Amino acid sequence: MSKKIYTGKVVSDKMDKTVVVAVTRLVQHPVFKKTVKKVTRFKAHDEENKCKTGDMVSVVEMRPISKDKRWKVISILEEA
């Protein structure tokens, strides 16, 4: 089983070794069939505190580190 990898934007870096990453996806509305943007916010582990707000990052699924943290930043794709 391969781990999920998502790309998103860092929306908060106020915590120590943790960033909040907003992942946007397009889904079709079940009744009206219109394409709608959905945003999911993940808390991701950032070991060296390198990520800043506005960065585009890649996150990978991993074992739970805390109550909310189940993702890890693997690379910074684009700096703010």
Image (spheres, rainbow, N blue to C red):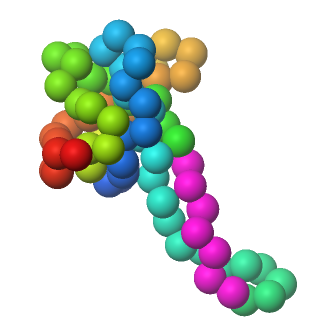
Q: Residue furthest front?
A: 80
Q: Would residue 57 be seen by someone viewing this image from the given angle? A: no
Q: 69 or 11: which is nearer to us?
A: 11
Q: Residue at x 58, y 69 (%)?
A: 37
Q: 49 or 44: which is nearer to us?
A: 49
Q: Would residue 53 be seen by someone viewing this image from the given angle? A: yes
Q: Residue at x 24, y 30 (%)?
A: 51
Residue 63 sits above or below residue 61 on the image: above
Quadrant of residue 79 within the rendered picture? top left
Quadrant of residue 74 within the rendered picture? top left
Residue 49 in the image, given as x and y percentages of width and height? 22, 19
Locate residue 67 relative to residue 10 in the image: left or right.
right
**Magenta region:** 34-40
Q: Residue at x 27, y 32 (%)?
A: 52
Residue 4 sits above or below residue 17 on the image: below
Q: Main secondary structure of the magenta part?
A: strand
Residue 28 in the image, given as x and y percentages of width and height? 65, 80
Q: Is residue 53 magenta?
A: no
Residue 77 in the image, given as x and y percentages of width and height? 16, 50
Locate residue 45 relative to residue 26 in the image: left or right.
left
Residue 45 in the image, given as x and y percentages of width and height? 33, 23
Report the label total.
0
Q: Residue furthest right?
A: 31
Q: Residue at x 37, y 25 (%)?
A: 13
Quadrant of residue 35 within the rendered picture? bottom right
Locate residue 43 relative to residue 4 in the image: left or right.
right
Q: Is residue 35 magenta?
A: yes
